[in-house]
Structure formats: C-alpha cells, structure tokens
Image (spheres, rainbow, N blue to C red):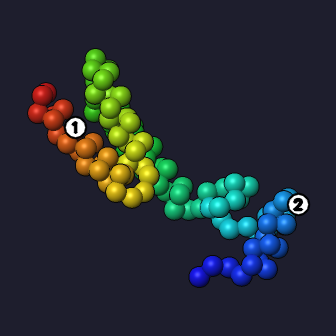
Amino acid sequence: MADPDALRMRRYRAHQAGDHHLCVVGRCKELGPDADQQKAAEATARLMAAVREEFPESDPLSLALAERLVELSAGTGVASVQAARALAELVAFQREQV
C-alpha cells in the first residue's frame, strides 16, 4: 500500500532540506543502496570476473558479447532472464570449441 500523501510530502520536504531520516532505503541516493541491491551488484561482479576468465582475450567479440550479456542479466524481468540463458548457451558453445 502506498504511503499517505501527508507522509510523502513531509518526506519530500525533509529530503529537499537535506534531512534523510524519512527517506526510503534504496530510493534515496544519499542513503546508498539497500542490502538486496548490494548483493545483486556483488553477484554481477563475480559473474563478470568468471566470464573474463572463461573467454580468451584472443576472441574479443565473444568476450564483449559475454560481458554485455552479464550487464543485461543484472536487471529485472524477462529480458534479464533471457540474457542469462543466452550467456549460458554462449559458455556452453565456447566450451565445446575448446
């Protein structure tokens, strides 16, 4: 359920004045990302590191494609799932070639 208009207005005014005690974690840049966003960013960083180890630098096109798929899979929704599947297929194909 959405917050009442009065609370939203108080939160907005406090935020504009530099007071972030009413701000919602994950929505206010001053408070930083929430724990779930931080975990997702760490998981994406680990996946990117694994992709860079998996794909050789001698094949820059495949490496660039894999890196882009990692970036897309970090989002939400159907597109991120499709990107993760495409990345898995690319890794499987890469391993067949070796």
Q: Is residue 42 above or below residue 19?
A: above
Q: Is residue 91 left or right of residue 57?
A: left
- Tag 1 secondary structure: helix
- Tag 2 secondary structure: loop
Residue nearest the viewer, comparing 68 with 79: 79
Q: Is residue 64 above or below residue 92?
A: above
Residue nearest the viewer, comparing 46 with 29: 29
The residue under label 1 is: 90
Q: Position of residue 60 (x, y in %)?
A: 32, 21
Question: Given the image, on which type of amino acid does mark 1 rest?
Answer: Leu
The residue under label 2 is: 17
Q: Position of residue 98 (x, y in %)?
A: 13, 27
The picture quadrant where one finds residue 22 is bottom right
Answer whether residue 46 is visible to the viewer in this image.
Answer: no
At a point 75% along the width and 73% down the height, the residue shown is 8
- Graded by Cα atoms within 10 Å as few (under 14), some (14 to 19) or many (20 or more), the crowding at tag 2 reads few
**Mark 2 vs mark 1: which is more N-terminal?**
2
The picture quadrant where one finds residue 71 is top left
Q: Position of residue 9 (x, y in %)?
A: 80, 72
Q: Is residue 6 above or below residue 28?
A: below
Q: Is residue 58 left or right of residue 9?
A: left
Question: Given the image, on which type of amino acid does mark 2 rest?
Answer: Ala
